[in-house]
Amino acid sequence: MIFGTTPAGDTVDRHVLSNGRMRAAVLTLGAIVQSIELPDGGDVVLGLPTVADYLERSRYFGAVVGRYGNRIANGRFTLDGVTYQLPLNNNGHSLHGGERGFDKRLWHADPDGERAVRLTYVSKDGEEGYPGTLTTSVTYTLTDEDELRIDYHATTDAPTVLNLTNHSYFTLGRPADVRGHIVTIEADHYLDVDEGKIPLPGPPSPVQGTPYDFTVPTRVGDRLDGCYDHCYILRPGGVVRVEEPVSGRAMEVTTTEPGVQFYTGHMLDGVATPYDRFAGLCLETQRFPDAPNRPDFPSSVLRPGEEHRSTTAYRFTW
């Protein structure tokens, strides 16, 4: 069904998935997850009502971000001896693909029955400063296990860097304030960052004995005033779990990616964005921020003949 149109007159479609219990709505703009509805009547992601809101008032609500999610220091990296300059759209750094990243692009949708839809976008060589023509597909599936599974796939015709993730803001209770959510992250280390949120030199920092330790269930608002925006290095097979004690809802996140950016929405303001501070939290499964400039991090380079594949699943109980 048609969701709306862009200022250029392009149609944005809305696809509704169902597994007989849960429903999820996905937009062709930005491959956005607009809603995830549970059988108890709860919508557990923050969505927006119009195309204009997504283009003008969104902080990446529900979108796939790319070509490179998270930050690249000074918007610059060198690959095979060539230096590339990206837009500086975040405090002198490049964030989430630049000024017009994947979240602002129209994707082509191929529905697969009632449960799944595949969205495809071709990013041309030089788009937002990145090398290589990149073909990306993202498949959303509602499974029998009450998961929203996201399968990412990408190929390129020239060496490039890539970090794909979904930027949904989750809230398992109402009113929306995630400081009361209880979070467990199976990660023994995190990436400490400077004022620009670029990882500091040196090895990852241990969480033990710090406010960043979520290896046991911890209420978000109990430390640091609930303000988190850091990449956690997951244990092999590590799981993230979120619980909301009043509603009884819970979400479990599994991924093939090595890290997860835990962001608690404290930079939402209710003015430039439709939602107030702490209205939702993000669990952005991904490669590490600034990896193109950090040979000590897992590589984010994709070359011709290779395939990028990753899977993340958000499983819900209620």
Image: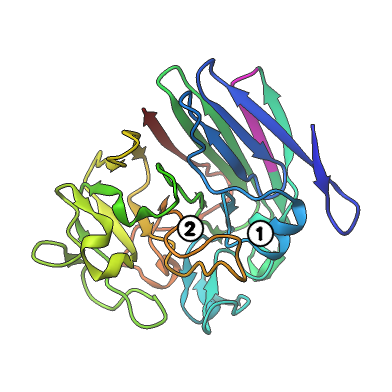
Say which mark, if any, is on residue 300. none
Q: Residue visible at 60% across and 77% down?
A: 89
Distance (Cα) linking label 2 and label 1? 11 Å
Q: Which residues are magenta?
A: 114-120
| In-front residue for pair 194/16 | 16
Dot 2 lies on which element? strand
Q: Quadrant of the C terminus?
A: top left
Expressed as whole percent of the image width and height from the top left, the position of residue 180 reads 30, 52
Bin the neighbour count of mark 2 within 10 Å (Cα to Cα): few under 14, some 14-19, many 20 and up: some
* Furthest residue in direction left, as rendered: 209
Q: Residue visible at 51% across and 35% down?
A: 151
User: Residue flagged by tag 1: what amino acid is it?
Assistant: Gly
Q: Is residue 241 left or right of residue 156?
A: left
Dot 1 lies on which element? loop
Please identify the quarter of the rendering in which residue 251 is found.
top left
**To which residue does mark 2 refer?**
301
Say which mark, if any, is on residue 132. 1
